[in-house]
Amino acid sequence: MPHNKTIKASIIGITGYTGLELLRLLLAHPNIEIGYLTSRQHDDVEIGDVYPHLAHLDLSITNTDHKTVGAESDVVFLCLPHKTAQDVVADLHGKVKVIDLSADYRLDDASTYERFYQEHKYPELLKDVVYGLPEITGLDKIAASSTIANPGCFALLGQMLLYPFAGLIESADIFAVTGSSGAGKTATDGTHHPIRSHNLKSYNINKHRHIPEITRAAQIDETQLNFVPSSGPFVRGIFANAFIRLKTDVDALDLAEQAYEDAPFVRLIDNVALANIVGSNFVDLSFVKGADNTIIAQGTIDNLVKGAAGCAVQNMNIMFGLDEGEGLLQLGTLYP
């Protein structure tokens, strides 16, 4: 595809944090023309009337049906709540390029999906939808796909920490802390800022729905992973520690360099910090040798960018034959 090719991109489910972040990234992309921005709660309203920070844009939110959106777009991003994207993907698959940011098609096994979510209405499609983590799935497979399932944010970082050692892992313990934007825009008792702003707590220990994504990439089963997701007093980002016990002694940094040598968004550094990645599509990783074949790995991502919208744009670039960093490497980081 020529570098100056225009891609008409639409977002179904624009009003959540992920949809808004995706719009921010697409507006900065040199190849994108915005198509439809849809919401079930709004119809034919200026986006600036709903979100004043976007008042400068001449864009409207509509409640256009998804089949019309698909027929009049080159790519459709689904920013719908989990469990509500299944029908939309089934209707659009093979008719337009689709990137689904929900959890509905991330697992390729119907029984595993049912155990962590619910019974899947279209189990036959789970094998057709490609899991879109470019650094692990591979560019060729994504490029050849019609529909992509974007990874979960915890899942993406957990996989990046463990993937260089796939097949060598005896067990792993991951403690990861996410910001409040990961809980979505609707406040609850546990996510409301007056509580969150001075609090740190864990939840869904060894029960989190991102576990099967992590174990698949690491080539381990659930009995070999302890996963402690936690909520922190900040808005954006995930900071994770992984304690990885290996079957043999390895040079961790060498394996990581081999795994990510062609990955433009992976930065292998000595000390990771949230402030270094917020607003960007980068994944910062560090690996330190511990005792007795143990690796202490740390990583950070912005949960709304690399953990969601940024990875989706990266997948779109690959699907349309663009450089995977197009419109993303230029973003930089919101520092300080």
Image: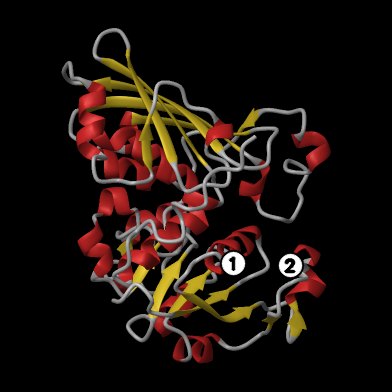
Counting from the top left corner in percent of width and height, residue 230 is at 58, 33
* Label 2: element kind: helix
* Label 1: element kind: helix
Counting from the top left corner in percent of width and height, residue 85 is at 50, 72
Residue type highlighted by circle 2: Leu
Would you say residue 82 is visible in this rendering? Answer: yes
Q: Quadrant of the C terminus?
A: top right
- The extreme top residue here reads 291
Please name the residue shown 22% across and 63% down the image.
141
Please name the residue shown 32% across and 61% down the image.
323
Judge whether 252 appears above or below 304 on screen. Answer: above
**Residue 334 occupies which quadrant of the picture?**
top right
Residue type highlighted by circle 1: Leu
**Residue 23 occupies which quadrant of the picture?**
bottom right
| Residue position for label 1 | 23
3D distance between C-alphas at marks 2 and 1: 10 Å
Labels 2 and 1 touching (C-beta < 8 A): yes
Would you say residue 121 is visible in this rendering? Answer: no
Judge whether 202 appears above or below 92 on screen. Answer: above
| Residue position for label 2 | 54
Disc on the earlier residue, 2 or 1: 1
Counting from the top left corner in percent of width and height, residue 214 is at 36, 42
Q: Is residue 275 left or right of residue 95?
A: right
Counting from the top left corner in percent of width and height, residue 273 is at 53, 28
User: Foreground residue, 218 or 236?
Assistant: 236
Q: Label 1: few (<14), some or many (≥20) within 10 Å?
A: some
